[in-house]
Image (cartoon, grey):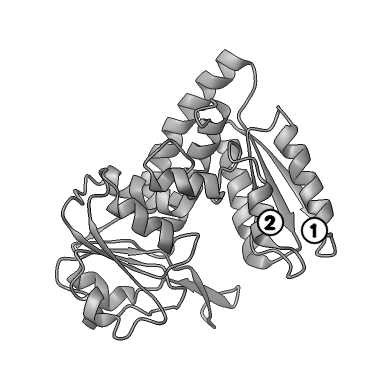
Amino acid sequence: MQLLDGKLVSEKLKNDIALEAAEFTKQSGRQPHLVAILVGNDGASETYVASKMKNCEKVGFKSSLVRYDTSISEAELLQKIDELNKDEGVDGFIVQLPLPKHINAEKVTEAIDHRKDVDGFHPINLGRMQRNLPCFIPATPYGILLMLQEYGIDTTGKYCVVVGRSNIVGSPMSILMARNNNPGNCTVTIVHSKTPDITEYTKKADILIAAIGKADFVTADMVKDGAIVIDVGINRVESSETKSGFKLKGDVKFDEVAPKASFITPVPGGVGLMTIVSLLKNTLSAAKKEIY
């Protein structure tokens, strides 16, 4: 079993990004600029956004945080998005999800200029991704592709099972793994909460990607020997062993699945770190105007 080490790969890629960003700044006279919009004070969102901002500074980007109370109206938020779309000093921006219930997340996503949509959620980017055209790929699936590339894992001809069908991870991941690309060229099955006997599919998978959002969901009996296991889950589970009162667990029961796997990602220290690297790569690409 070999660990797919997100920390190791993300640090290497951040060094590469920093060199590219320095060259961009030298040529253009300005730093790549990422803006994050945060509505409310959800604990997980606060952590994610703080990490994104910190990593921007590490690689030589400018980062800005726009905060709003949960009472902000949908119209006010859409007005801010319109401002950022028109601001030539902003290369890319994200609206951190989840949003309060009175704000339509789909409407917000579609209001973002697809050329600044560094989260890769806009329908134009998703459509281009499906067509294998230049686009911003959603950050978590993109991070998984980068990790597979860095470890030189050949996915061609493999059977890939994706557990979960969210618009953020499961659905785009299934498209990416099936595209005529490397990583890609897999035969792909998506299983989800309405699939009868999920194990029937997962135990045949050469590559198993777990993104269902349930701690320890994938157990040893669901995985075939030698499988490549990618754990996307980041679940906060109550724990008396930590100061915070919780610990992070993946969707995969790591201790029992790891001995069966040829490669496996840990949680934490796996896919989560790669997601941030992907956001940085997308922002640099936006600054260079690589997406039309």
Graded by Cα atoms within 10 Å as few (under 14), some (14 to 19) or many (20 or more), the crowding at tag 1 reads: some
Establish if 72 lies above or below 202.
above
Secondary structure under badge 2?
A: helix
Question: Depth-wise, is mark 2 or mark 1 nearer the camera?
Answer: 2
* Left or right: residue 106 compared with residue 80: left
Residue 212 visible in the current orientation: yes
**Residue identifier under label 2:** 107
Residue name at image x 33 percent, y 61 percent: 265
Residue name at image x 51 percent, y 19 percent: 23
- Camera-side residue: 68 or 62? 68
* 2 and 1 marks in contact (CB < 8 Å): yes
Residue name at image x 21 percent, y 52 percent: 155
- Camera-side residue: 116 or 68? 116
Q: Residue 39, image x and y in percent?
A: 75, 59
**Residue identifier under label 1:** 74
Residue name at image x 57 percent, y 28 percent: 287
Establish if 290 lies above or below 182.
above
* Left or right: residue 197 compared with residue 87: left
Q: Earlier in the sequence, mark 2 or mark 1?
A: 1
Q: Quadrant of residue 56?
A: top right
Q: Residue 127, image x and y in percent?
A: 46, 47
* Left or right: residue 191 compared with residue 112: left
* Left or right: residue 23 compared with residue 209: right
Q: Amino acid at mark 2?
A: Lys
